[in-house]
Image (cartoon, helix red, strand yellow):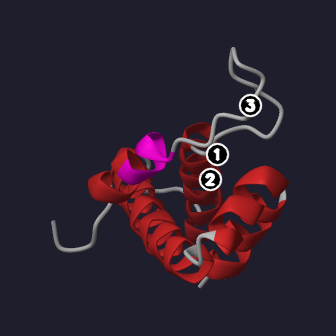
């Protein structure tokens, strides 16, 4: 099983401003856990879709491809570190991240 929490933590560390905001707000652990669960669910969803689409493919290849797609989705919703808003401050809205979480909530 991929280390989802480690992957998410590294993605957050790649965005020092977001990482610091989560740390200051004391929501780092909760955010990391929620994003890791969502990443796992997204990975599983892609695994199922790819396995159905290409049933004769190597399972390891499918898993790798599914992880790449899930990571791409997660990275797209996290605010980029280098995109200042019009007033010169970093855009730290987590609305897109919350949408990602709601889309891949286990059991929903």
Question: Hey, which residue is sitting farthest left in the picture?
Answer: 108
| Residue 101 shown in magenta | no
Residue at left offset 43%, top offset 59%? 42
User: Which stretch is magenta?
Assistant: 94-98
Whether label 1 touches label 2, CB < 8 Å = yes
Q: Residue at x 72, y 79 (%)?
A: 6
x%, y% of residue 65?
Answer: 62, 52
Vertical order, 78 against 48 (above or below): above
State the image quarter where residue 45 is shown.
bottom left
Kindly identify the residue that appears in the image at 47 percent across and 49 percent down. Answer: 97
Question: Quick one: SS at disc 1?
Answer: helix
CB contact under 8 Å: marks 1 and 3: no
Q: Which residue was labeled with disc 1? A: 75
| Front-most of residues 85 and 70 | 85
Q: Earlier in the sequence, mark 2 or mark 3?
A: 2
The residue tagged 3 is 89
């Amino acid at each position: 099983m991929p280390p989802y929490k480690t992957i998410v933590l590294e993605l957050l560390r790649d965005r020092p401003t977001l990482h610091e905001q989560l740390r200051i707000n004391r929501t780092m652990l909760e955010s990391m856990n929620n994003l890791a669960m969502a990443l796992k669910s997204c990975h599983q969803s892609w695994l199922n879709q790819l396995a159905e689409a290409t049933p004769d493919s190597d399972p390891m290849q499918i898993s790798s491809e599914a992880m790449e797609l899930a990571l791409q989705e997660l990275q797209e919703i996290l605010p980029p570190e280098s995109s200042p808003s019009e007033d010169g401050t970093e855009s730290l809205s987590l609305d897109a991240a919350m949408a990602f979480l709601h889309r891949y909530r286990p059991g929903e």
